[in-house]
Image (spheres, rainbow, N blue to C red):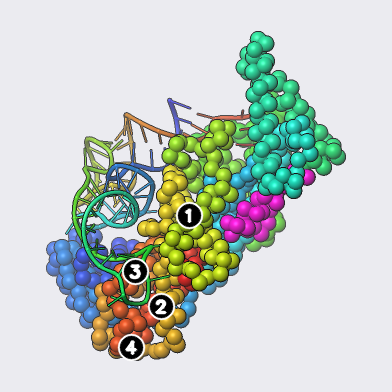
RNA sequence: GGCCCCGUAGCUCAGUGGAUAGAGCAGCUGCCUUCUAAGCAGCUGGUCGUAGGUUCGAUUCCUACCGGGGUCGCCA
């Protein structure tokens, strides 16, 4: 194209002006070049220019067999043989795997508090971070997956205190309750008792604010936090015991959700970090002192002033985040990038954090990134833990799996499958529905969680994609041994439009994956996978495979199917979703 | 109020400067004695929040306004 341009018009093509795009399905062609940007440069009308360029390209490029011009759009038709080659490629190796880049990336994608169980919001966070990790690995990065556990502070003391007061020694073992659920139950108990005390105090004539501050049970919790900080053995022992219950619960949920971490950071260990770094910054003149506290001034950058160390010398949240970031880069030499998968309610926090680290002069400060995902809303409105409107993660998974089972049993395609194998399948399908539902939308946007739609197994869903994969596997099983096909015979016989559509979508996939990795956006992978399997289903319905009489075409279509299955399985792997061989 | 994000079909979402704006769901029609109907084919459905601007061309970029959300502690 560049050559054609130079030879015919003796003008250089402006860099980055040449845009190749996939031809829209309603026109004939595979690749489209828009010539509008060049008409002024060359002084030709759009149609004439497009036609002349089309002729030149045809002459120079054997891959292009035909072209047509509609308005200023030059549509090029690529030879069938080239598309057949794409099938060979995708069959022979993983086209969604790129060579190692040597780059090491840390992804933080969970930061639960240890006083209550995981909920729907955590699931979006976890699935998103897990998928981003897989996508980054697929494009060749080395990924370190980490979580931060907020295991200390007033919240956990509240649960501990309520358990001491009202628990009668209840344990997960004897009650049969999951550990995180049990601890969460006492957090609620605390809140109830606290509110009752407030009411009593207000009835006795105190204002609401006074009552909220002076309720005895709150003072007791605060006292417990002081004892924790002083290292009181009794408090520490209870803390370890109850946190242990929570971890058992979390780990059960993580295992079921199919996610894991390479490293856990506990707030009880990191909350002391950062102080020294802030003091060092003070010395360097990056920060300043006012009223005995240490501040950073970000007003020049359009942000505010922010306290980093209180007057009494204790840290704030920001302080430990500064320290933790520094520690991570020390712990992982060669770490090139750190991605925080955290909700967009913390946009401002991360802006400030990154700015501070830049001011402190860390060379890696520009490689920090906040993957800011939107909140999950319910049809009834926002999820609020205080109002009990949160959707529990375990309950939700139970529901989608139950729905998968209900439909699976109803369709009764699995009657010869063992009960254990069925359990595994329904688990796989239910989780696919849930994960795909949460991953198919742009992570940056807030999304509405419709419980009915999330357990849907038809249409634009995870199970639909799984179904297509299972269908292909069944086809391949019935086909028996693999036979070869001759590309030139396919070339001369021509491709069916359904075949061509599938192959083009497959061909685009590697660049979509790359784009998803750049933008940290699994929804791009999710949507491309859907497009691909949708096109495959149209092909499957319209074009015979096993029943095709011509041996070459039959083998070719089987390989096309094999390639689609392979790409689909890998794409779903990148989303953290498993695919079955039958369903 | 300052700053940040979002307004696309009845609903949920794709579409980050190009052609007549797409999909799923919902509603309506067809297609299973033939490779898995969790499927396929089709119909219905849109002033891309509003008004300006930039451009050969704007859902996409800029400005203002309207509507929704978030955030602005020596809390975590």
Q: Quadrant of the N terminus of chain A?
A: bottom left
Identify the residue at horizontal 70%, vertical 51% (top origin). A248
Q: Can residue A38 be seen from the camera position used here? A: no
Identify the residue at horizontal 43%, vertical 76% (top origin). A474
* Label whose residue precedes the other's in the sequence (3 or 4): 3
* Label whose residue precedes the other's in the sequence (4 or 1): 1
Q: Is residue A245 magenta?
A: yes
* Nearest to viewer (mark 2 / mark 3): 2
**Dot 1: element:** helix
Image coords of residue A227 (percent x, y): 81, 33
Badges 3 and 1: C-beta atoms under 8 Å apart? no
* Nearest to viewer (mark 4 / mark 1): 1
Look at mark 3 in the image and give the residue it sits on. Answer: A537
The CA span between labels 3 and 4 is: 21 Å
Mark 3 and mark 1, same subunit? yes
The CA span between labels 4 and 1 is: 42 Å
Look at mark 1 in the image and give the residue it sits on. Answer: A403
């Amino acid at each position: 194209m560049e050559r054609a341009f130079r030879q015919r018009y003796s003008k250089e093509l402006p860099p980055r002006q040449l845009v190749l795009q996939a031809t829209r399905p309603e026109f004939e062609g595979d690749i489209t070049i828009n010539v509008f940007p060049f008409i002024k440069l060359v002084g030709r009308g759009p149609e004439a220019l497009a036609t002349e360029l089309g002729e030149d390209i045809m002459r120079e490029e054997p891959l292009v067999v035909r072209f047509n011009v509609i308005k200023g759009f030059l549509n090029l038709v690529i030879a069938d043989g080239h598309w057949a080659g794409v099938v060979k490629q995708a069959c022979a190796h993983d086209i969604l795997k790129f060579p190692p880049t040597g780059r090491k990336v840390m992804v933080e994608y969970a930061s639960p508090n240890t006083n209550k169980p995981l909920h729907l919001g955590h699931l979006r966070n976890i699935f998103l971070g897990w998928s981003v990790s897989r996508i980054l690995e697929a494009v060749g990065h080395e990924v370190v997956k980490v979580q931060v556990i907020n295991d200390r502070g007033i919240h956990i003391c509240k649960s501990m205190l309520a358990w001491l007061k009202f628990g009668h020694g209840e344990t997960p073992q004897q009650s049969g309750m999951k550990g995180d659920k049990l601890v969460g139950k006492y957090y609620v108990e605390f809140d109830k008792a606290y509110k009752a005390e407030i009411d009593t105090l207000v009835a006795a004539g105190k204002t609401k604010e006074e009552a909220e501050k002076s309720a005895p049970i709150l003072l007791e919790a605060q006292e417990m936090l002081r004892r924790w900080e002083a290292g009181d053995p009794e408090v520490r022992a209870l803390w370890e015991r109850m946190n242990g219950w929570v971890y058992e619960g979390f780990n059960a949920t993580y295992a079921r959700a199919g996610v894991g971490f390479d490293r856990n950071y506990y707030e009880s260990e990191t909350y002391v970090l950062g102080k020294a770094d802030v003091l060092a910054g003070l010395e360097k003149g990056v920060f300043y002192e006012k009223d005995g506290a240490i501040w950073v001034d970000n007003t020049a950058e359009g942000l505010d002033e922010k306290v980093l160390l209180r007057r009494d010398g204790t840290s704030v949240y920001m302080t430990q985040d500064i320290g933790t970031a520094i520690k991570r880069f020390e712990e992982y030499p060669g770490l090139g990038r750190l991605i925080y998968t955290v909700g967009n309610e913390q946009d401002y926090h991360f802006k400030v954090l990154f700015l501070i680290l830049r001011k402190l002069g860390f060379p890696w400060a520009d490689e920090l990134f906040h993957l800011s995902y939107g909140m999950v809303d319910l049809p009834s409105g926002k999820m609020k833990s205080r109002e009990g409107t949160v959707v529990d993660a375990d309950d939700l998974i139970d529901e989608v799996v139950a729905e998968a089972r209900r439909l699976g049993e109803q369709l009764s395609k699995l009657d010869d499958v063992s009960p254990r194998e069925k359990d595994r399948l329904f688990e796989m399908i239910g989780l696919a529905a849930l994960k795909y539902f949460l991953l198919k939308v742009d992570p940056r946007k807030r999304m509405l969680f419709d419980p009915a739609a999330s357990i849907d197994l038809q249409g634009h869903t995870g199970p639909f994609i799984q179904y297509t994969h299972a269908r292909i596997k069944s086809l391949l099983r019935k086909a028996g041994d693999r036979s070869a096909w001759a590309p030139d015979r396919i070339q001369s016989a021509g491709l069916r439009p359904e075949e061509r559509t599938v192959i083009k979508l497959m061909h685009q996939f590697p660049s979509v994956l790359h784009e998803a990795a750049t933008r940290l956006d699994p929804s791009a992978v999710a949507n491309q996978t859907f497009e691909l399997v949708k096109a495959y289903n149209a092909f499957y319905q319209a074009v015979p495979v096993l029943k095709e009489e011509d041996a070459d075409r039959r083998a070719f279509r089987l390989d096309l199917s094999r390639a689609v299955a392979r790409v689909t399985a890998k794409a779903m792997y990148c989303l953290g979703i498993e695919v079955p061989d039958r369903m």
